[in-house]
Image (spheres, rainbow, N blue to C red):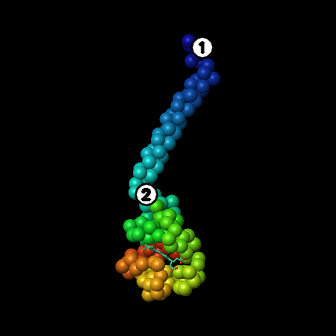
Amino acid sequence: MPYLHRNPSCESRSSSRSKGTVTAVVGSLAVGLALVMMNSAFSSDRTEVMVAASEFAPGGQAAEGARIIASKPCGACHTIPGVPGAQATIGPNLAGVASRTKIAGGAVDNRGPNDLKAWIMNPGGLKPGTAMPNLGLSDDEATKIVAFLVTLK
Ligand code: HEC
């Protein structure tokens, strides 16, 4: 036994083994923590997960707009990327709406956020007889919805 104690290779082997164990323990703790954090992120409200995935600042206007859209009947008529459950085809798909220079079948100019806002607040006023109803949005709701719509390029 004294021989073993004097053997440097034996010493270094045993110390590197214990370092390895410490590294493994710390490593699995980190993985466990990451899993716990992911789990709590994904178990929260679906809209928040979508918003995180879409790189909107949480609580920002675009994120709020997406949340408001999800609470209105927009998704009963439109497919809207990033809004869970909005997959209808009665109205146009809103994917790319911010890049269109005309909306409502070419009847209405879309030169930017103000035009989109005017449209969603009063579709029939801009295109009499349109199938999109007036949803009674408040000015604030419309501003936030448009902050989201302009991200659909
Ligand atoms: C009852 C069905 C219906 C609902 C509800 C509805 N829309 Fe529409 N929407 C339409 C139709 C139909 C059009 C196309 C109108 C046209 O061409 O005259 C349209 C057009 C649009 C357009 C222009 C898109 C384009 O390319 O022409 C936007 C933007 C839009 N809707 C946003 C919304 C938002 C936001 C909501 C919810 C606040 C909403 N819509 C709710 C039916 C609906």
User: Crowding near pointer 2: few (<14 within 10 Å), some, many (20+)?
Assistant: few
**Would residue 140 be seen by someone viewing this image from the given angle?**
no
Determine the residue positioned at 47% across, 41% down: 32
Q: Which residue is mark 2?
A: 46
Looking at the image, is 31 positioned above or below residue 85?
A: above
**Position of residue 95 in the picture relative to residue 85 (left or right):** right
Which numbered circle lies on residue 103? none
Determine the residue positioned at 43% across, 45% down: 36
Across and down, in percent, residue 7 comes to 61, 19
User: What whole-number distance in Å separates the C-alpha atoms at marks 1 and 2?
Assistant: 65 Å
Q: Quadrant of residue 44?
A: bottom left
Q: Which residue is mark 1?
A: 3
Across and down, in percent, residue 133 comes to 42, 78
Q: Quadrant of residue 139?
A: bottom left
Q: Nearer the viewer, residue 144 or 36?
A: 144
Mark sitting earlier along the chain (1/2)? 1
Placement of the N terminus among the 4 image quadrants: top right
- In the image as oriented, which residue stretches furthest toward the right? 9
Q: Secondary structure at mark 2?
A: helix
Placement of the C terminus among the 4 image quadrants: bottom right
Question: Is the residue marked 2 within 8 Å of ligand 1, measured from its CB?
Answer: no
